[in-house]
Image: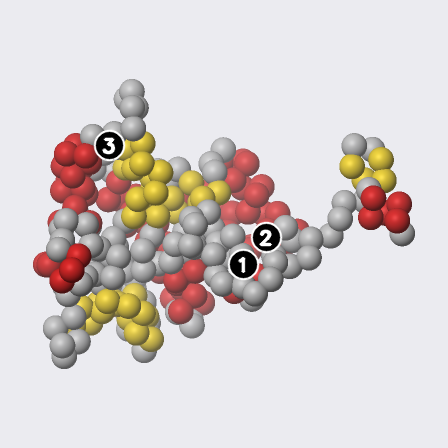
Amino acid sequence: MEYRLISTDDHFVEPRDLWQSRVPSAMREEAPRVVREDDGYETWYMGDRRVRPVGYSSLAGTDKSAGFPKTYDDMRPGCYVAAARLADMDADGIDAQVLYPNVAGLGGQGVLHITDPDVRLASVRAYNDGLAEWCAEAPARLIPNCLIPMWDIELVPDEARRAVGLGHRGIVFAGTPDALGYPPIFDEYWDPLWGVAQELDVPIALHIGGNAPTGAAPTMPMPKSIGGLGSVYTIAG
């Protein structure tokens, strides 16, 4: 396909049944699910935690003065139906879209609301499966980025390989993992992530706003040498 216009910041509004139709039945209460509240709003929950209304990031094609949609039925279908998304892209003259999560977190950190690590991993895998299936409607036009189990670096390479094998073209990551309680982005802890991205020849996708808030950047150690010469830090003692 010859591309003229690629939108590099679009979102996959996770369908209502994305997780509930894919995780084992014993995990469904803890995995992401939609609950209709007494006020009529459909809301995402993870376990007992109320995450946010389903329409929070789904204002496309709506009267914004009326607020965000209450339910999936109130959303523009192109938010969560692949065929309808393609029709909207045609109307906008967009050849392809690079897709990021919504309720799963712009940097993939949304799944950390799930306390059970087994359910969390199953939810990451379900997201990657579901998005790959969604993008199979038009793989040259719908470009998926996968989630990774960032809480356990030993699990990251295998899930990245599995997801890329399904058709994912990039890896979603939070740029400030230290604010989530993990080592900073420059720590050797993350070397398996950089290694598998290089092995698979896929980019790491950092979404603006997908970083957890942090008061100050962690201190990055100075290199001991630059171009074969001692760094200023080293020379200064």
Measure the alpha-carbon separation of dots 1 and 3. 33 Å
Determine which of the numbered discs, if any, sits on residue 23 in the image: none
Image vertical order of residue 40 relative to residue 96, above or below:
below
- Dot 1 or dot 2, earlier in sequence: 1
Marks 1 & 2, CB-CB < 8 Å contact:
yes
Taking the spot 85% from the left edge, 35% from the top edge, the residue there is 229
Measure the alpha-carbon separation of dots 1 and 2. 6 Å
Residue most toward the top? 2
Where is mark 3, residue-wise? 94
Q: Position of residue 8 (x, y in %)?
A: 35, 38
User: Label 2 is placed on what type of residue?
Assistant: Ile
Residue most toward the left? 73
Res. 133 image quadrant: top left
Mark 3 falls on what kind of element? loop
Q: Position of residue 155 (x, y in %)?
A: 51, 54
Q: Position of residue 193 (x, y in %)?
A: 55, 47
Specify few, some or many for label 1: CA neighbours under 10 Å numbering under 14, 14-19, or 20 or more.
many
Taking the spot 31% from the left edge, 32% from the top edge, the residue there is 6
Task: Return the residue nearer the eye: 129 or 140.
Answer: 140
User: Label 3 is placed on what type of residue?
Assistant: Ile
Q: Is residue 89 left or right of residue 174?
A: left
Marks 1 & 3, CB-CB < 8 Å contact:
no
Where is mark 1, residue-wise? 177
- Dot 1 or dot 3, earlier in sequence: 3
Q: Nearer the viewer, mark 1 or mark 3?
A: 3
Specify few, some or many for label 2: CA neighbours under 10 Å numbering under 14, 14-19, or 20 or more.
some
Where is mark 2, residue-wise? 185
- Dot 3 or dot 2, earlier in sequence: 3
User: Label 1 is placed on what type of residue?
Assistant: Pro
Task: Return the residue nearer the eye: 170 or 95.
Answer: 95
Mark 1 falls on what kind of element? helix
Q: Is residue 29 left or right of residue 152?
A: left
